[in-house]
């Protein structure tokens, strides 16, 4: 499952890196859900940051900052 999440995330990041932000988002969201189910804190934080990056790239700052905040709180142990 962890490898699956990594592979799915990789596909999403290919779309992101080629400027296809709308296509990248479902892949990263899928990886996030897998990582949450596995209890993979490090992977979950990475996915949350990637989702934030996607939203920021799409000029959706409200959602972007919301995901950055979730990542920060999880990483600090406050969630």
Image: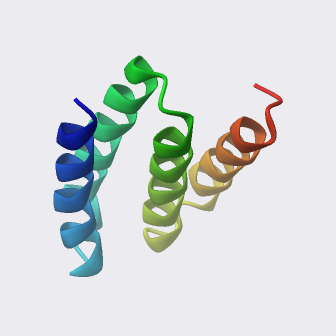
Is residue 64 shown above or below 66? below
Q: Quadrant of the N terminus?
A: top left
Q: Residue at x 29, y 66 (%)?
A: 21
Look at the picture and state if 18 lies above or below 47: below
As rendered, which of 11 and 3 lies closer to the eye? 3
- The count of marks equals 0
User: Residue 20 vs residue 64: left or right?
Assistant: left
3, above or below 1, in the image: below
Examine the image and state in which quarter residue 76 appears. top right
Expressed as whole percent of the image width and height from the top left, the position of residue 72 reads: 74, 48
Q: On screen, 10 above or below 27?
A: below
Percent across and percent down for residue 75 are 71, 43
Left or right, residue 1 beside residue 31: left
Asked which colour scheme the image uses, the reply is: rainbow
The residue lying at 50 percent from left, 52 percent from top is 46
Image spot of residue 73 (x, y percent): 77, 39
**Residue at 73% over, 46% down:** 69
Q: Nearest the camera: 29 or 37? A: 37
| Left or right of 3, for residue 52 | right
Instruction: State which quadrant residue 18 falls in.
Output: bottom left
The residue depicted at 54 percent of the width and 44 percent of the height is 42
**Farthest residue toward the bottom?**
18
Quarter of the rendering occupied by the C terminus: top right
Question: Looking at this rendering, what residue extends furthest in the top direction?
Answer: 37
Residue in front for this viewpoint, 71 or 52 = 71
């Amino acid at each position: 499952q962890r490898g699956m999440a990594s592979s799915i995330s990789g596909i999403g990041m290919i779309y992101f890196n080629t400027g296809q932000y709308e296509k990248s988002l479902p892949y990263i969201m899928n990886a996030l859900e897998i990582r949450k189910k596995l209890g993979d804190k490090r992977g979950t934080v990475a996915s949350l940051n990637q989702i934030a990056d996607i939203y920021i790239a799409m000029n959706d700052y409200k959602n972007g900052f919301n995901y950055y905040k979730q990542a920060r709180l999880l990483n600090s142990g406050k969630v």
